[in-house]
Image (tube, rainbow, N blue to C red):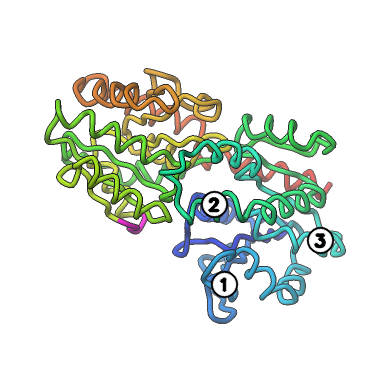
């Protein structure tokens, strides 16, 4: 058993989640507890403070949080006094979700506890990509998430970068962006630790589920920057050659109305199904039944969790060729990279996999082997433990 206690802070945590940060916090918490590190997660989405003992080394404390944007701000304002009181009892404070932690960090320094911050998004880099969105593809929700909320997001980022003793980024491309945007920060306190998956979970539940062929799986938050509109246009090209092709979209978000409009416009009602949000266990089952996973995101901070999960399911992953995807996808070995923003090339790459069973199987197996070797939480957790212990020396 460890002789120090860790607090993880994220307003998102399963089963209440929007994106990858909640999954990341869950996997980190479980990995710490498996290593017998006493860990407590502070998260939101409760009407009153509640306590859940998950195992002897892991506790989840759910706090009140208004269920409308900006949730991360309400989480901090509603729980400020309670959080500062409870954080006194921990040796390490890890702000897993930077937005939900920035204002806490202003006063947490007074506790004289080491502060660790995880960076899952570089907001200026995200904004630079978002401003390229064609006006007719824009949704009000997207504009709010990436544009209107930018000043508050950026302020939160600057506060946390200043107050954190150690900063973890999930990719090298994100670290390079940070160096360009914030050149005065001491980068000796930065560490790159890639996102990961619990490979044992995927191995334990691996079975040869019958594929629904030819079928494509997309999952994630339905926002423009995730690239789903590019994928719809690629399906419109492919359906003439492969009339039985099916795209299943899992997730929710402000772009959903626009997606439905595109489905009608491109006459894809027989080919595209919007399935909404489903529990993680069900999602993994759906991924395993698919032929290929296509996640043409235009911006991530590094190897992103949804892509790693597809690889752990032994499925070929097709993404756009961008700096963050090159950090974990080796083209034509453990996945396929399509030219960023090029719908025809994306369609060509999907066709290549669907019509070549041998290639599809090789890509899937290589993807699994790669994730098991490079992105397994059993390995990644050692990096976090080293950072924690270095702060206590």
- Measured as percent of width and height from the top left, residue 20 is found at 50, 49
Dot 1 or dot 2, earlier in sequence: 2
In magenta stretch: residue 329: no
- Measured as percent of width and height from the top left, residue 97 is found at 62, 54
The residue carrying mark 2 is 21
Residue at coordinates 76% horizontally, 69% vertically from top-left?
A: 89
Q: Nearer the viewer, mark 1 or mark 3?
A: 3
Which of the 4 image quarters holds residue 253? bottom left
Residue 379 at least partly seen: no
Dot 1 or dot 3, earlier in sequence: 1
Q: Residues within 10 Å of mark 1 (few under 14, many from 20)?
A: many
Q: Residues within 10 Å of mark 3 (few under 14, many from 20)?
A: some
Which of the 4 image quarters holds residue 263? top left
Residue numbers of the magenta segment: 276-280
Task: Report how far apart the C-alphas of labels 2 and 3 lie in the structure.
Answer: 22 Å
Q: Nearer the viewer, mark 1 or mark 2?
A: 2
Q: Is 359 located above or below residue 317 in the figure?
A: above
The residue carrying mark 1 is 62
Numbered circle sitting on residue 106: 3
The chief SS type of the magenta part is loop
Dot 2 or dot 3, earlier in sequence: 2
Task: Report how far apart the C-alphas of labels 1 and 2 lie in the structure.
Answer: 16 Å
Residue 190 at least partly seen: yes
Give 209 or 151, whichever is nearer the viewer.
Answer: 151
């Amino acid at each position: 058993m460890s002789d120090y206690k860790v607090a993880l802070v994220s307003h998102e945590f399963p089963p209440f989640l929007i994106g990858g940060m909640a999954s990341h916090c869950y996997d980190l918490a479980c990995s710490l507890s498996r290593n017998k590190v006493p860990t407590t997660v502070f998260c939101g989405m409760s009407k009153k403070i509640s306590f859940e003992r998950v195992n002897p080394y892991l506790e989840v404390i759910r706090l009140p949080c208004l269920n409308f944007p900006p949730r991360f701000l309400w989480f901090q304002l509603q729980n400020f006094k309670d959080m500062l009181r409870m954080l006194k009892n921990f040796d390490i404070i890890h702000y897993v979700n930077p937005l939900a932690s920035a204002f806490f960090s202003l006063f947490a320094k007074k506790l004289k506890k080491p502060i660790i911050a995880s960076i899952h998004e570089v907001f200026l880099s995200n904004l630079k990509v978002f401003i390229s969105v064609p006006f007719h593809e824009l949704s009000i929700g997207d504009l709010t998430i990436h544009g209107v909320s930018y000043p508050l997001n950026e302020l939160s980022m600057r506060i946390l970068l200043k107050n954190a003793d150690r900063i973890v980024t999930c990719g090298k491309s994100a670290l390079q962006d940070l160096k360009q945007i914030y050149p005065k920060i001491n980068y000796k306190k930065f560490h790159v630790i890639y996102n990961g998956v619990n490979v044992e979970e995927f191995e334990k539940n691996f079975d040869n589920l019958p594929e629904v062929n030819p079928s494509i799986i997309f999952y994630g938050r339905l926002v423009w920057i995730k690239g789903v509109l590019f994928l719809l246009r690629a399906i419109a090209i492919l359906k003439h050659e492969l009339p039985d092709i099916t795209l299943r979209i899992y997730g929710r978000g402000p772009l959903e109305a626009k997606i439905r409009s595109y489905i009608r416009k491109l006459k894809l009602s027989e080919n595209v199904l919007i399935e909404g949000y489903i529990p993680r266990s069900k999602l993994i089952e759906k991924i395993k039944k698919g032929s290929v996973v296509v996640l043409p995101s235009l911006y991530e901070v590094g190897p992103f969790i949804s892509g790693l999960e597809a690889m752990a399911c032994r499925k070929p992953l097709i993404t756009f060729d961008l700096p963050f995807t090159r950090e974990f996808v080796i083209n034509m070995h453990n996945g396929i990279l399509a030219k960023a923003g090029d719908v025809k090339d994306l369609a060509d790459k999907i066709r290549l996999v669907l019509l070549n069973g041998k290639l599809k199987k090789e890509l899937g197996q290589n993807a699994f082997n790669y994730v098991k070797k490079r992105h397994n939480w059993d390995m990644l957790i050692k990096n976090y433990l080293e950072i924690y212990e270095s702060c206590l020396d």
